[in-house]
Amino acid sequence: MRLFRLAKILRISVRYGLDEMILEHESSGRLVALTRMFFFWRRFTVPPAERLRLALESLGPIFVKFGQVLSTRRDLLPADIADELAKLQDRVPPFSSELALAEIAKAYGRPASEVFAEFNATPVASASIAQVHFARLHAEDGGFDVAVKILRPSMRDVIAHDLGLLDTFAGLLEKVWADGRRLRPREVVAEFAKYLYDELDLMREAANCSQLRRNFAGSNILQIPEVYWDFCTPTVMVMERMRGIPISQTEALVEAGIDLPALSRAGVEIFFTQVFRDGFFHADMHPGNIFVATDPAHHGSYIALDFGIVGTLTDVDKNYLAQNFLAFFRRDYKRVALAHVEAGWAPPDTRIDEFEAAIRAVCEPVFDRPLREISFGRVLLRLFQTSRRFNVEIQPQLVMLQKTLLNIEGLGRQLDPELDLWKTAKPFLERWMNEQLGWRAFVDGIKREVPNWARTLPQLPRLVHQSLAQPAPVDPTPLLAQIAATQRQQNALLGLIALLLLALLLARYFF
C-alpha cells in the first residue's frame, strides 16, 4: 500500500513541480538542473505557492490537513506559501451509508436500529477524519435529538502510511535545503502527527467538549453541546444536536435579528475567557465549526462544534501572555522585550533597546485603527521575522493560540469590520490581571492556602525541634582531601604496574 501511495505522491509532485521547488534550494544547483533537463517538457504558469496548494489538495485529506496546520507556522514559512496554504479547505466526499452503519454496529455490537429510535443514514457534514449523522435516542434513553459523529473506517492505517511518507520527505528537505535544519521540518511533522492522532480518538474529543461545556456553564454568549457518554466510544461520539445559523451566513443572521457588532465583541470575550481564565481553548474556530443560536432562550449566542483540537496553557504561559497583551495595548514595548528575555524565550544577552525598537516598528502602525484596516496575519508575520532576527524561540504551546487568533480575526472582519479589538480586549485583560496579581488575588490565595495551614501549623513545633536536635553538619573538606590522596596513590600504583607489564613484554620480545 505504501508503494502505491508513494507512486501517486511522486506522480503528483512531478505534475506540480514540487521536486523542483525542493531541489532548487540545494546549494550546488546540480540537482535542479538535472531535474529540468529530465522533465524538459514541463511549463508552469502559476506561482510555486499555488502549485503547492493544488498538489496538497490532489494528495487527499491528510495532506490537506497538514497544509492547514503548516499554514499556522508563519515563523517557518515564506509569506506567499503561508497565505496560499491558508486557503486549503476540507472538501472530502462522505463515505457510504453502509459503511457508517457497519461502524456503528462494530462500535456497539448491535445495529443502529437498536441503538437509536431514528437514524438518518445521509450524513449532514463530512470532513477528513469523520462525518456526522443526525439521530434520535429511544424514549427510555431520554428521546433526545442527537448528532452522531463517526470516524472514517481504517483511518489509522492511512494516517500511519502518510505520516511515514511525510517524515521521509521532511528528512530529504533537511538534507537538500540549506535552510532546512532551521525550519525543523521533521519536528513540524511530529507536531502534526500528535494533533492528528488525538483527533482519531473520539473519546478524547468528547472529553474536550465536556470540559468546555463545564467551563461555560450558565453562559449567555457560548453554547456547547451535551455529551451522552453512554453512547460514546473511540470511533463514535454522540452529543446533543445543536440548531443555529452558520456564522458565515451574515445575511441570514441579520434577517434573524442578530446584532452583528455585539456578536463580534462576544467572540473576542469568548476567546480571552478561554485563554486567560481557563487556559483551555477551542483551537479550530473556523466558520464551519461556529453557529449562532436563534431560539428565544439563547438568541444571539455562539454555538461551538468539533472539539478534536484544543489548546492548553499553563499559569506561567497565561501570565506571560497577559503581560505581553497589556504591554502591547499600552504601547509599552520595552516591557514586551523584557518579558521575552525574562521568560527565557530570547537570549539573556539580547539588546533590550534594539529589541524594543524592532517591536515598536511592527506594532505601532496598527493602533487606533478599525479591524478592517489591520491584518493580524501580517502583524504576526512581521513579529516572527523580528523574533528570528533576535533568536527568539517560538514556543510550541502557542502555535494553536496563534492559529485561533487568526480565526478570531476572520470572524471579526466578517461580522463587524469596524470592531476595535484593542478597546474590546483591554478592559477584560486588565480585570484578569487585577484578579491574578492584585489585592483580590492575594486574598484568594490566602483562602486557598488556609486549609493547608490548618493541617501544617500544629506540626511546626515538632518540626522545629527535630531540626534543632540534628547534629551539626560535618565539614566534608578533610574527607575529600583523604579521598583525593588515596586516588593519587592508586593512580601511581597503576602507573607502576603498567610500566612493569611493558618491561616484561619488551624483555620477552627482545630476549
Image (cartoon, rainbow, N blue to C red):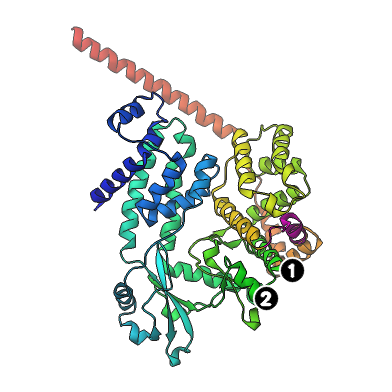
Of the numbered discs 1 and 2, the one sitting upstream in the chain is 2
Magenta-span inclusion, residue 425: yes
Mark sitting on residue 447:
1
Residue 345 is at least partly visible in this image: no
Tell me whether the residue at label 1 lies in contact with that at label 2, contact meaning CB atoms closer than 8 angstroms: no
Residue 116 is at least partly visible in this image: yes
Kindly state the secondary structure of the residue where label 1 is placed: helix
Q: Which residues are magenta?
A: 416-433
Q: Residue at x 33, y 42 (%)?
A: 15
Magenta-span inclusion, residue 85: no
Does residue 109 appear to the left or right of 329 in the view shown?
left
Residue pointed to by mark 2 = 257
Picture coordinates of residue 396 (x, y %)?
54, 49
Does residue 356 appear to the left or right of 36 in the view shown?
right
Residue type marked 1: Lys
Residue extending farthest to the bottom is 140
Measured Cα–Cα span from mark 1 to mark 2: 45 Å
Residue type marked 2: Gly
Label 1 packing within 10 angstroms: few (<14), some (14-19), many (20+): few
Kindly state the secondary structure of the residue where label 2 is placed: loop
